[in-house]
Image (tube, rainbow, N blue to C red):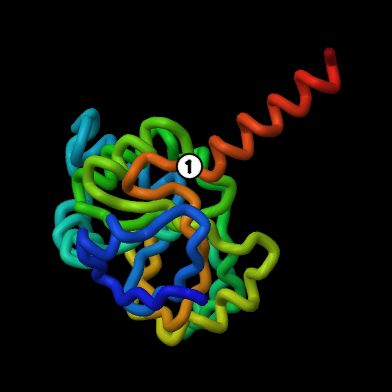
C-alpha cells in the first residue's frame, strides 16, 4: 500500500521511509535538470560566476519552495507557452545520474527532502540523503502523460531562458506515484541491483 506524503515533508517522515516503499506525493515541487543544477552550484555554492540578471530574485523565490521540498528531474512538454496559461502535457522523469556532480550540494543548500528521477544516483547523493536527511524517489519511465495527469496546476516558471525542458517549473501535484529507491539510512536499491548484476556476470564469465 502506498504511503501518502504531503510536501513539505518532515525529517521524521523521511527517516521512516525504506527502499522499496511506494509513495503518493502531493503538494508543490520544482522541476530542475542540468542547467538549473549547474546554475545553482556555480552561482550560489562554488560562486565561480557572479549573480546576473534576475539570479538573486529567483534564488530568493525558490528557497522557501525547496526547503523541505522536492526537485523533480523532468523536462516537461508544456502547452500554453504563447498565452502564459501553462499546462503539462507530458512530465516523465529524466535520467538522474547526470546531476550527480551537483545534487548533494544542492540538497544541503536548500534542505531538500527528496529528489525524483529515474535510474538512481551515486555515492555523493546517497551520502547527502543520510546527512540532510532526504530520499531518492524513482518515478516511472515511459509514463510521461500519466504523470502529467497528477499535475493539478502550473504555478509559475523560473529561468525560462534555459529552454522549456531545462527551466524550473513550479507545479502542484496530487498523488504523484513514486518508489523510494535510496533512503536516509544509506540503502540504495540501485547499488544492490548493480552488485547482483555484477555477480551474475562474473559467474557467466567464469
Left or right: 171, with 205 as reference point: left
Let me know if residue 166 appears in the view.
no
Q: Position of residue 88 (x, y in %)?
A: 53, 77
Please count the marks in the image. 1
Left or right: 181, with 205 as reference point: left
Q: Position of residue 104 (x, y in %)?
A: 31, 39
- Name the quadrant containing residue 4: bottom left
- Above or below residue 81? Residue 185 is above
Q: Position of residue 114 (x, y in %)?
A: 35, 57
130 or 109: nearer the viewer: 130
Left or right: 52, with 166 as reference point: left
In the rendered image, the residue lying farthest to the top is 206
Q: Position of residue 33 (x, y in %)?
A: 45, 50
- Above or below residue 165? Residue 9 is below
Left or right: 141, with 104 as reference point: right
- Name the quadrant containing residue 141: bottom right
9 or 110: nearer the viewer: 9
178 or 46: nearer the viewer: 178
Crowd band around label 1 with a 10 angstrom C-alpha radius: few (<14), some (14–19), many (20+): many
- Above or below residue 203? Residue 113 is below
Classify mark 1: helix, strand or loop: loop
Q: Residue at x 33, y 44 (%)?
A: 185
Let me know if residue 42 appears in the view.
yes
Q: Residue at x 27, y 65 (%)?
A: 13
Question: Which image quarter is the C terminus in?
Answer: top right
Q: Residue at x 29, y 72 (%)?
A: 7
Q: Which residue is mark 1?
A: 188
137 or 192: nearer the viewer: 192
Q: Residue at x 46, y 34 (%)?
A: 122
Amino acid at each position: 500500500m502506498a504511503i501518502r506524503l504531503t510536501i513539505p515533508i518532515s525529517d521524521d517522515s523521511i527517516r521512516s521511509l525504506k527502499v522499496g516503499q511506494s509513495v503518493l506525493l502531493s503538494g508543490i515541487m520544482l522541476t530542475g535538470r542540468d542547467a538549473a543544477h549547474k546554475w545553482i552550484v556555480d552561482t550560489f555554492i562554488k560562486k565561480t560566476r557572479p549573480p546576473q540578471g534576475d539570479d538573486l530574485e529567483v534564488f530568493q523565490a525558490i528557497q522557501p519552495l525547496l526547503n523541505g521540498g522536492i526537485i523533480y528531474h523532468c523536462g516537461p512538454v508544456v502547452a500554453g507557452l504563447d498565452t502564459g496559461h501553462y499546462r503539462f502535457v507530458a512530465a516523465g522523469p529524466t535520467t538522474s545520474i547526470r546531476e550527480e556532480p551537483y545534487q548533494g550540494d544542492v540538497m544541503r543548500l536548500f534542505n531538500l527532502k527528496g529528489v525524483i528521477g529515474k535510474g538512481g544516483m551515486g555515492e555523493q547523493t546517497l551520502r547527502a540523503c543520510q546527512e540532510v536527511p532526504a530520499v531518492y524517489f524513482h518515478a516511472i519511465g515511459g509514463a510521461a502523460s500519466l504523470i502529467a495527469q497528477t499535475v493539478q496546476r502550473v504555478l509559475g516558471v523560473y529561468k525560462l531562458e534555459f529552454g522549456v525542458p531545462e527551466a524550473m517549473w513550479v507545479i502542484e501535484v496530487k498523488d504523484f506515484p513514486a518508489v523510494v529507491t535510496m533512503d536516509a539510512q544509506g540503502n540504495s536499491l540501485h547499488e544492490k541491483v548493480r552488485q547482483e548484476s555484477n555477480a551474475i556476470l562474473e559467474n557467466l564469465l567464469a
